[in-house]
Image: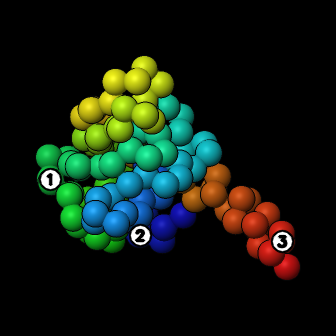
Amino acid sequence: ANAGGGQCGLGVTLRNDRNGDLRVVEIARGGPAFRQGTLQRGDVMTMVNGVNVRGVSVVQARDLIMGPEGTPCQITAYREANLDPNGVGGPMQFTIMRGRTGASAAPQQQQQQQQQQ
């Protein structure tokens, strides 16, 4: 997907919420985070590879998340109890292997564009 050769991510869309926290708003179907099934919509990322990302921009977080395909990305996220299937919530740590995400996202974007026309 990238001409530079190998910068890959996790297949998640992040947005800064009202508090400035990085909230997962979408997980790309077929992407690394989707395949692993650990991160979910509504989770708040607090650390990426040991770097505190509370209050950082989406662009800064993306720069920390992106890396060579097949390399591990360590994520610490906070899940609110009402979003947790077990009703517990709290901080959680995941290691997700970076991978390609563009191929699975492109058909969805084309469908959305067709629906808008």
Say which element carries label 1: strand
Give the quadrant of residue 92.
Answer: top left
Q: CA distance from mark 2 to mark 1?
A: 24 Å
Which residue is labeled 2 in the image? 4
Q: Amino acid at mark 3?
A: Gln
The N terminus is located in which quarter? bottom right
Mark 1, residues whose alpha carbon is within 10 Å: few (<14), some, or many (≥20)? few
Q: Is residue 75 left or right of residue 102?
A: left
- Which of 49 and 8 lies nearest the eye of the viewer? 49
Q: Position of residue 50 (x, y in %)?
A: 14, 46
Mark 2, residues whose alpha carbon is within 10 Å: few (<14), some, or many (≥20)? few
Identify the residue shown where x is 60% and y is 42%. Answer: 30
**Mark linked to residue 114:** 3
Between discs 1 and 3, the one toward the N terminus: 1
Identify the residue shown where x is 64% and y is 52%. Answer: 104
Q: Amino acid at mark 2?
A: Gly
- Which of 26 and 95 lies nearest the eye of the viewer? 26
Q: Amino acid at mark 1?
A: Val
- Tag 2–tag 3 contact (CB < 8 Å): no
Q: CA distance from mark 1 to mark 3?
A: 40 Å
Q: Is residue 98 left or right of residue 60?
A: right
Q: Is residue 99 visible?
A: no
